[in-house]
Image (spheres, rainbow, N blue to C red):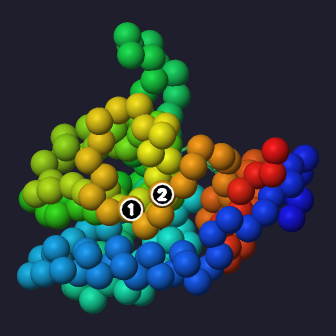
Amino acid sequence: MKVLDKEFRVSIPEAEILKQVARVASEINRDYEGESPVFLAVLNGSFMFAADLLREITLPCEIHFVKLASYEGVNSTGKIHEILGLSVDITNRPVIIVEDIVDTGLTMAHMLETLEKHNPKSVNICTLLLKPEKLKVALDIKYRALEIPNDFILGYGLDYDQLGRNTRDIYTVVE
Ligand code: 5GP
């Protein structure tokens, strides 16, 4: 499949994705028994994963969608990260972040830091994909559907320059 200037091939077929999504959902159903978690899905990349994951969750739960804004700030660490659209009160509630892919881990590290300020009961990360070789920060990722090598991927919600989100399979760039 060609998207803009790059060629992609199927690397994870739909059946394998759905199998691993169901596995992660059953881990969450087991771990959160008796609780009512708040899922926070990070747009845009996680929309398809969130839909399939939530169909497998049997707990009483809520789902909310947030966006992350990242921009250069004037503080010493450089970037400022903000969670847009967090309209639900997560004080004293168990929160599960639903993310498309963890690469360096910086995005999730900043999100955790911001969420902690709202005093949730707990926060865990549930990611569709993880590139373990690229992880730069110590991050406790409790739920991961699939681990992948460093190559750039798209599909099943993930984009290349906003294109390619609408495929059932995941594709890897052909170098
Ligand atoms: P991190 O902060 O962990 O380095 O970056 C995470 C974000 O980078 C993801 O939410 C996603 O937007 C983007 N990203 C990292 N690797 C890929 C990839 O292979 N494909 C796509 N489409 N996005 C990626």
On the image, the x and y values in percent for residue 7 come to: 86, 54
- The circle drawn on residue 147 is 2
Q: Is residue 170 left or right of residue 45?
A: right
Asked which secondary structure carries label 2, the reply is: strand
Amino acid on which disc 2 is placed: Glu
Front-most of 170 and 83? 170
x 49%, y 37%: residue: 134
Q: For residue 136, what is the image quadrant?
A: top left
x 16%, y 75%: residue: 32
- The circle drawn on residue 144 is 1
x 50%, y 47%: residue: 131
- The circle drawn on residue 82 is none
On the image, the x and y values in percent for residue 90 come to: 20, 59
- 40 relative to 67, above or below: below
Q: Work out how far the residue at label 2 is from the one at label 1, CA to CA, in angstroms.
A: 7 Å
- 13 relative to 107, above or below: below
Front-most of 27 and 69? 27
